[in-house]
Image (tube, helix red, strand yellow):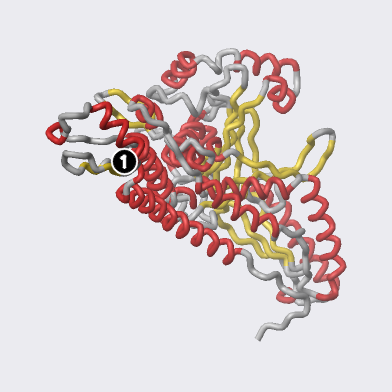
Amino acid sequence: MGKKKLHRVSKVLPKARYDSLAEQKVRRGGKKAFDVLMEAQHCWMLMDQFRRDRERNKKYAYGKQWDDVVCVDGRRMKESELIKRQGNLPLKNNLIRRMIRNVLGVYESQDKEPTCTARDRDEQKYGETMSTVLQYNMSRNRMRKVNSRSMEEFLISGFVVHRKWHGWRNNTLDCWTDYVQPNNFFIDPNMRDFRGWDVSCLGEIHDITYGELISKYAHSPEEERNLREIYSHASNRRVVGTAFEQFGYSLENRYDFLVPQDGSLCRVIEVWRKESKARYRCHDPNSGDIFKIEIEDYEEEVARENEERRREGAFMGIPDDEIPYIKAEWFIDSYWYYYFLTPFGDILDEGETPYEHKEHPYVFAAYPFIDGEIHSYVADVIDQQRYVNRLIMLYDFIMKTSAKGVLLFPEDALPDHMSMDEIADTLYESGYYHRLCGGIGVKAIFPGNTLTNLVLGLTASVEVGIYVGNLIEDILRLVASLNLPLPVVGLQCV
């Protein structure tokens, strides 16, 4: 009988411990994470339409309302350029900015300091302490200004992001809140919960100076040399594209995610992903604590502790079924894991979330996020704003090109004893009309003073006035709905 070949157990049996992160590290090898970088780029590219819409909304909000691109005779140009080529002025009446200022005024007037109220009255003193801490942090981060600008961003783009973190800034160790530019932020495209509870991947692009880079990620002269070597080519698109093709990824001329516009800055991509691994969920009935442990820690933290409690219970005469053993349940745990990557996929820093809440550090809000779509308040009134601008252009064109003080005099009505110049002088002196002696009564018409032009002007004024009035009425109605009375202390609700 021939000798049978032996196979490793790890090759023929399923793995007892599931760890998505460990599998990825084995698959990718080394200190690179191209798969993570490509997933982040995919999320960022899917938000391209949002970035385009945000830029258009921002232009309309701040007065650049004729910057839409049109195609004329095969040539692309801005609407303002086309209007100027036609000999007109691109006039506008910015109603959107007025609406934003009104809403911001109401929001800022209602901005109050945060307070904490304990549900248990015996712990109210802790609530008062927390209120003091929150108010200090709000003042430290200049949150009134941050919140006002964030509200303005929310009105314009429909999306606002803050980043909460703990660390050193200006020689102070504290909790900080940073406004995140939405163009540099990316998020899981499969997310549908407007609360953000189902997000599995998100992150941010950082463009920092070389000094900031080495101060954060270089902890030895060797690491500083490595970073210098990496970022000496990070702004070269050809080198970046070649590096990705060598690892089986094609950029297809999409470099915006990897290469900063300013070549003097260093790009760092921060990515937060949900990973999975096998762990034990433990319940200690002796203290009432519920906690999680790693698979390799089961023997030390559960088995040995239970054995110690068994011996102690036996010594005290406690029945075995009354001993408070730690109960452990095997499960697949989802947790947040972060990466800081270079444009070449090198891992500058990685690790499991360090925060006590075990979540990512971002706080974001998107409106309305129905089916994952973002639509801003400004976008809802762009068409009405364009209509107002076109009306202004139209009536300005009519008033500019209309005939003013022009008189048409029939030649067959010219008397024999008068020349055309004498007729003109006579009509000019007489005003509206003059009856010529020996000829046909001719009426001198000045179109600029006629009822037709008067009606035209009134019609323009009425139409624009009605429209602007309705829009302002809608704005005031919105402001009134926001300007609710503040609650009174001790007020009872029935």
Pick the residue in front: 262 or 79: 79
- Measuring from the top left, give residue 274's x and y in whole percent: 55, 46
- Residue at 65% from the left image edge and 44% from the top image edge: 163
Q: Secondary structure at mark 1?
A: loop
Quarter of the figure with the C terminus: bottom right
Residue 148 left/right relative to 117: left
- Residue at 67% from the left image edge and 22% from the top image edge: 209
Quarter of the figure with the N terminus: top left
Q: Looking at the rendering, which quadrant does residue 311 occupy? A: bottom right
- Residue at 44% from the left image edge and 46% from the top image edge: 189
Answer above or below: position of 132 versus 211.
below
- Measuring from the top left, give residue 375's x and y in whole percent: 45, 50
Pick the residue in front: 192 or 230: 192
> Where is mark 1, residue-wise?
446
- Measuring from the top left, give residue 59's x and y in whole percent: 49, 37
Residue 43 appears in the figure? no
Answer above or below: position of 303 versus 243.
below
Residue 208 appears in the figure? yes
- Measuring from the top left, give residue 327's x and y in whole percent: 66, 65
Residue 424 left/right relative to 333: left
Residue 459 left/right relative to 324: left
Pick the residue in front: 283 or 349: 349
Pick the residue in front: 469 or 380: 469
From this viewpoint, which residue is outermost toward the left?
412
Identity of the amino acid at label 1? Phe
